[in-house]
Amino acid sequence: MTGADADARTHADADADAGARDERRPAGELEAAVMAALWAAGAPLTPGRVQTELGSGLARTTVATILTRLHEKGVVSRERQGRGYVYLPVQDAAGLTARRMHGELDRGTDRQAVLARFVAQLGPADEAYLRRLLRGDDR
């Protein structure tokens, strides 16, 4: 094999590796898909059942890893079923979003500034709704 052949092979291998990486989805996207499957089911699911619901060709072990990470984050609960676990969301989608918003707010160094900027960026309808909520009108 000549040096040029070796270089061409190396570039082809690198291109194939890059293509494989491009097909991988970010963890957040996978977690969102798993959560969507759990919410849609409305009942506890095994990793195998979540895999089936996703229908995306993910390995069962990948789904199990995602579910374990979600459990460690406190986003899903799990119960023993046979030799494995079944998983269930701790909150609905709106509750999870609110939890994430609280997390972001807690990470800020100036809570009042973060809240002020958040409210300033609301559209008129959202601002009116927030005012009703703060008055206790729409709980």
Image (cartoon, rainbow, N blue to C red):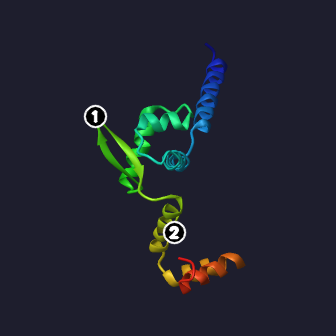
Residue found 51% across the figure and 67% down from its top:
98
Q: How crowded is mark 1: few (under 14 residues within 10 Å), some or many (20 or more)?
A: few
Q: Mark 1 points at which residue?
A: 83
**Quadrant where the N terminus is found in the figure:** top right
Is residue 117 visible in this depiction of the protein?
no
Is 41 positioned to the left or the right of 69 in the image?
A: right
Mark toward the viewer: 2 or 1? 1
Residue found 54% across the figure and 84% down from its top:
134
Q: Residue 6 in the image: state x and y as whole percent.
A: 61, 20
Q: Check whether the beta carbons of the residues at disc 2 and disc 1 lie within 8 A of each other.
A: no
The vertical placement of 23 against 76, above or below, is: above
The vertical placement of 109 against 103, above or below, is: below
Residue situated furthest right in the rendering = 124
Q: Residue 101 carries which label?
A: 2
Which amino acid lies under the numbered mark 1 shown in the image of this protein?
Answer: Arg
Q: What element carries label 1?
A: loop
Which amino acid lies under the numbered mark 2 shown in the image of this protein?
Answer: Met
Q: What element carries label 2?
A: helix
Q: Quadrant of residue 11?
A: top right
Q: Which of marks 2 and 1 is nearer the N terminus?
A: 1
Q: Name the foreground residue: 132 vs 29.
A: 132
Q: Residue 131 in the image: state x and y as whole percent.
A: 61, 84
Is 72 positioned to the left or the right of 36 in the image?
A: left
The vertical placement of 119 against 84, above or below, is: below
Q: Residue 31 in the image: state x and y as whole percent.
A: 50, 48
Q: Residue 106 in the image: state x and y as whole percent.
A: 44, 73
Residue situated furthest top in the rendering = 1
Q: Residues within 10 Å of mark 2 (few under 14, many from 20)?
A: few
Is 113 positioned to the left or the right of 63 in the image?
A: right
Residue found 47% across the figure and 31% down from its top:
59
Q: How far apart are marks 2 and 1 (CA)?
A: 36 Å
